[in-house]
Amino acid sequence: MAFVPFDDRDGWIWFDGDFVPWRDAKTHVLTHALHYGSSVFEGERMYGGEIFKLTPHSERLKRSANLLDFDLPYSVAEIDAACKETCAKMGLSDCYVRPVAFLGAEQVSVTARNSKPHLAIAAWEWPSYFDPEVKAKGIRLEWAKWRRPDPATAPSAAKAAGLYMICTMSKTAAENRGFADAMMLDWRGYVAEATGANVFFVQDGVLHTPPVDAILDGITRQTVIEIAREKGIEVIVRHIRPEELATFSECFLTGTAAEVTPVSEIGEYRFTPGPLSLDLMEAYGRRVRRQD
Ligand SMILES: Cc1ncc(COP(=O)(O)O)c(C=O)c1O
């Protein structure tokens, strides 16, 4: 399939309260966010006409902006409504939704005192984040060379564009070497998360996952913990050292884009997509489509 650049597509983008033709949804090169990283965003999925966990996503968007010391001039309810309107305007009922909030071109300076927040929302069809054939067998990850920063170094709880540069470099390097993704450690050396997804491990029927003290508090992660506990599966949230990976039988990633994706390999460690991962993958698929 030919790659269609994202700035040359048909459709509409919600931009500061109005719909603009997709190709005209532009911002100036002197936009603060482009120079200083003042941008936060969300990634959401609509399944069968409903955006899964829409309000928690809109709440996280506002929280992320606040963590970067700016405030969005829209309520959570207004952002929810704009996301739904964007999907409707695009005629989509199964799609990915990307709200992005950023400081504009009012002032080029490290200070943001005179900068104004802007919000844009785009939606497009995006069936699978990882190749579906590879996903069924489990994806292969290498160790990332970059580490998730200490929350005292960067606002690591925010879904902020600036924090993604280390993710972009890690994922691009991994793909260049034939891997699907990279697993990051945090600044202390604990297992953190993949470049766009959280991680879970299985040991004797129990799930183990890192706490959210240096990683994104994933909404899919929260959902999978909830589903697992409803099923009577024990979930232990704790720091995990890389060498402990030898003691886990299964591993999977969770994320809005990745959904639940089994992992077969992280660096020198091997996993077999097993019953627990596959059960949670199916259960998550039913939950997002309101079939459970
Ligand atoms: C770095 C990172 N961690 C975790 C996640 C998973 O978050 P969520 O489940 O809310 O999509 C994402 C998803 O975008 C991510 O980019």
Image: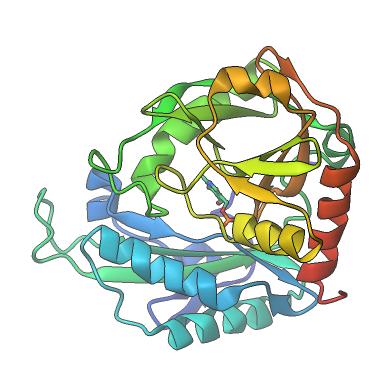
Give the x, y percent position of residue 217: 49, 54
What's the image's color scheme? rainbow
Q: Nearer the viewer, residue 3 or 236?
A: 236
Is residue 79 in view?
yes
Q: Is 54 above or below relative to 192?
A: below
Count the marks: how many? 0
Residue 73 is situated, as x and y percent measured from the top left of the image, at: 29, 80
Residue 193: image x %, image y %? 55, 37
Which residue extends farthest top?
268
Residue 282: % across, % down: 87, 56
Camera sees residue 4: no
Report the front residue among 56 and 280: 280
- In this picture, residue 30 sits left or right of residue 52: left
Nearer-the-camera pick, 264 or 131: 264
Decide: is 93 above or below 97.
below
Indicate left or right for 148 with 130 as reference. Answer: left
Q: Residue at x 46, y 66 (%)?
A: 24
Residue at horizontal 62%, vertical 54%?
A: 221
Q: Residue at x 36, y 28 (%)?
A: 187
Q: Is residue 176 left or right of residue 105?
A: right
Q: Residue at x 38, y 42 (%)?
A: 163
175 above or below 132?
Answer: above
Is residue 154 depicted above or below 117 in this figure?
A: above
- The C terminus sits in image quarter: bottom right
Q: Quadrant of the N terminus?
A: top right
Residue nearer the viewer, 192 or 37: 192
* Residue 222 occupies quadrant: bottom right
